[in-house]
Image (cartoon, grey):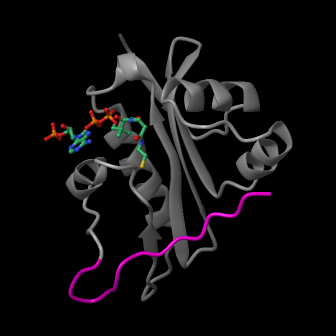
Amino acid sequence: MSIIYLDEIPDVKTYHELRTAVEWCVFCKEQSEKALKNSFFCVVAKDGDQTVAMGRAVGDGMYYTIVDVMVKPQYQGQKIGSTIINRLVELINVGIPEGGRTSIQLIAALGKEGFYVKQGFKVLPNENSGPALRKVIYT
Ligand SMILES: CC(C)(COP(=O)(O)OP(=O)(O)OC[C@H]1O[C@@H](n2cnc3c(N)ncnc32)[C@H](O)[C@@H]1OP(=O)(O)O)[C@@H](O)C(=O)NCCC(=O)NCCS
């Protein structure tokens, strides 16, 4: 099996297929389309013409949030997720000016924090920061 990685945004159907494959809820088409379009960076992994994984970053050049990191179950445990994270971090790094500073935030799914720690992320709270907070709004 040969996996290729592309810096591209998947279409909504593919995005929804990935979310369903990892048993996440699916956002409505309108919201999904807008969100995907607003990605700052997006990386997909393909096996032939099938998209088997993705991850994306939203942000403003100083702060980024990594979201939608999903590897189809039958492709997990093959370094695809970590390759996607490393590519997103690399893309973010390239844009940082000399003397600049950028931070990358994310909320790990339950039990997945160890995966991100292996990619160099630090669990909060730590010696410099309090815990992460989140408000989810339903309409
Ligand atoms: C979490 C997920 C993205 C990991 O992707 P993956 O391709 O299976 O992971 P990789 O093969 O790249 O793993 C890289 C390393 O992280 C480790 N790792 C993977 N999942 C882990 C977990 N839940 N806890 C601790 N370590 C983990 C691997 O053992 C591997 O370690 P190694 O480098 O020492 O061999 C994938 O399992 C997935 O899509 N899960 C469902 C959706 C999800 O929860 N996404 C995360 C959202 S925050």
Q: Is residue 95 visible?
A: no
Q: Position of residue 86 (x, y in %)?
A: 36, 50
**Relative to the observer, which residue lies in front, 16 or 64?**
16
Q: Position of residue 52 (x, y in %)?
A: 49, 23
User: Residue 14: within the magenta?
Assistant: no
The single residue placed furthest to the front in the displayed view is 139
Q: Identify the residue at image location x=44%, y=62%.
A: 106
Q: Identify the residue at image location x=66%, y=30%.
A: 16
Q: Is residue 63 left or right of residue 28?
A: left
Q: Is residue 127 left or right of residue 4?
A: left
Q: Identify the residue at image location x=58%, y=41%.
A: 7
Q: Which residues are magenta?
A: 125-139
Figure quadrant of the C terminus: bottom right
User: Residue 138: within the magenta?
Assistant: yes
Quadrant of the rendered structure where residue 32 is?
Answer: top right
**Relative to the observer, which residue lies in front, 31 or 48?**
31
Figure quadrant of the N terminus: top left
**Relative to the observer, which residue lies in front, 23 or 116?**
23
Magenta part mainly helix, strand or loop? loop
**Relative to the observer, which residue lies in front, 13 or 108?**
108
Quadrant of the rendered structure where residue 89 is?
Answer: bottom left
Residue 126 versus residue 46 in the image, above or below = below
